[in-house]
Amino acid sequence: MTTADIKRLGLILAVQAEIEGMKAENKQRERHDYSMAYSDSDFHDQAEKIREIINKHDDQL
């Protein structure tokens, strides 16, 4: 792996951690019968962040 690969992986894992936090928040709110904090569009936005990271040139990381 190159340095850029490691940076890219780290950035993707950071977004994935955010997604897991969003899912956990939604589950907690669901248990308390509250409205969801995050919608499908919020998850799609996070997926788009990952796509952008994947497509960045190494010197843009």
Image (cartoon, helix red, strand yellow):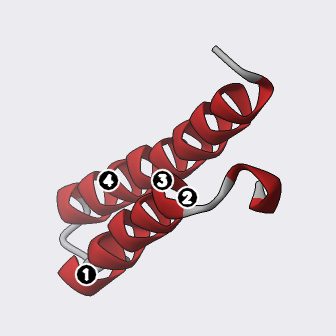
Numbered disc 2: secondary structure: helix
Distance from disc 3 to disc 4, alpha carbons, whole Å, reads 23 Å
The answer to which of marks 3 and 4 sits earlier in the sequence is: 4
Q: Position of residue 23 (x, y in %)?
A: 32, 53
Instruction: Tell me the residue at 18%/71% (across/down).
Output: 33
Q: Residues within 10 Å of mark 1 (few under 14, many from 20)?
A: few
Amino acid residing under circle 4: Lys
Image quadrant in which you'd find residue 47 = bottom left
Please name the residue that numbered disc 3 is placed on.
Answer: 54
Give yes or no for contact between labels 3 and 2 (Cβ–Cβ under 8 Å).
Answer: yes
Q: Nearer the viewer, residue 15 or 37?
A: 15
Amino acid residing under circle 1: Ser
Image quadrant in which you'd find residue 8 = top right
Q: Position of residue 11 (x, y in %)?
A: 64, 45
Amino acid residing under circle 3: Ile
Distance from disc 1 to disc 3, alpha carbons, whole Å, reads 23 Å
Distance from disc 4 to disc 2, alpha carbons, whole Å, reads 21 Å
Distance from disc 2 to disc 1, alpha carbons, whole Å, reads 22 Å
The answer to which of marks 1 and 3 sits earlier in the sequence is: 1
Distance from disc 4 to disc 1, alpha carbons, whole Å, reads 10 Å
Numbered disc 3: secondary structure: helix
Q: Residues within 10 Å of mark 2 (few under 14, many from 20)?
A: some
Please name the residue that numbered disc 2 is placed on.
Answer: 53
Please name the residue that numbered disc 1 is placed on.
Answer: 39
